[in-house]
Amino acid sequence: MVKDNWKYTLYIWDGIVTVGIAEGKQIQDTPLPFQWEGSWVPVTGVPDAADAAAPKRQAFKKDIDADCKFLVKGSATRLHTNGEDDQDKGKTNEGAADDDDKGFYVAKLTEGDGWEMEDGEEKSRYHDATHDVWVKSLKWSGNQKDQTESLVVAKGANDFGPFVSVGWIRPGCRWTVARRYLSETDPRAKMSFREFYQTVVQECISFAKESGEKLLLVPPWQIAAMHANYQEPTNRTPDGVDSSKRKRQKKMTI
């Protein structure tokens, strides 16, 4: 953890995901073994998440240049709807992100070697107590028409406090995700996963009416929901988007 300015630091994890095959008899929604391995770098002095660029990776190198590595494992399970449990299936939820009925995966990543952190001249290894990731697709789908399939959103907690993460899936099944640690009183720490996911989608996905495309802001963590000092939007349009941010967001293709 970067001392003294942890709140103004984004911790960007970059690595390859591997999805295994479920053991035993496979039925719908059988958990799949899941692994994410790579390196992470701190980007300091970025209370405004829009100032944090994605780390560069040299050609032909597997990982970005970083001092700390991670290897987290767990399982990924398909949800019936956007985060609803089985008993909630079929219920409606006002303000829900669209395409709820298509289902999501939730990956729980608390196992494995964990993640390294420098402590003076030595490195310590840590594990997250909770680390839940929501994605529409576990691997890169290449779907340019609906780029919500490339969005990665996570919430969790560890010895350093609660955190939220936003990133995207890139070719080669590479996940690049920025983590922001929060104070216990931060409104995002108390948000349900569904609510936080919808907040992220409203800020980083734009809809092209003519083509019907859903375009992802890249990198997707450059949004108000990932700023150090977050205030819940009060100036929302009828479709739930904070209109004060709509015009200044720049969308890019993946």
Image (spheres, rainbow, N blue to C red):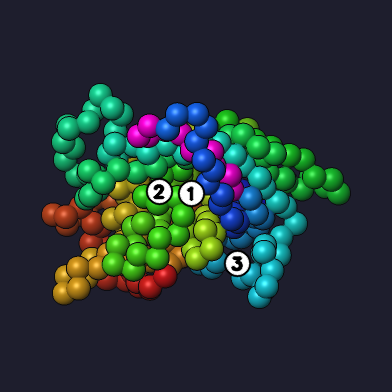
Look at label 2 and name its amino acid: Val
> Which mark, by number, is residue 55?
3
User: Are there few (<14), some (14-19), or many (20+) residues within 10 Å of tag 1?
Assistant: many
CA gap between label 1 and label 3 equals 16 Å
Residue located 42% across and 70% down the image: 254
Residue located 39% across and 42% down the image: 105
Rendering coords of residue 157 (x, y %): 54, 35
In the rendered image, which quarter is residue 195 located in?
Answer: top left
Q: Residue furthest top?
A: 87
The answer to whether one can see residue 185 in this image is no
Q: Which residue is mark 1?
A: 165
Residue located 67% across and 62% down the image: 63
Look at label 3 and name its amino acid: Pro
The answer to whether one can see residue 107 in this image is yes
Q: Is residue 49 left or right of residue 237?
A: right
User: Magenta segment range?
Assistant: 27-36
Considering only order in the chain, which callout, 2 or 1, is on the residue closer to the N terminus? Answer: 2
Q: Is residue 184 left or right of residue 41?
A: left
Establish if 213 lies above or below 160.
below
Q: Is residue 226 left or right of residue 201?
A: right
> Which mark, by number, is residue 135?
2
User: Are there few (<14), some (14-19), or many (20+) residues within 10 Å of tag 3?
Assistant: some
In the rendered image, which quarter is residue 213 located in?
Answer: bottom left
Considering only order in the chain, which callout, 3 or 2, is on the residue closer to the N terminus? Answer: 3
Q: Are circles 1 and 2 on residues that touch, CB within 8 Å? A: no
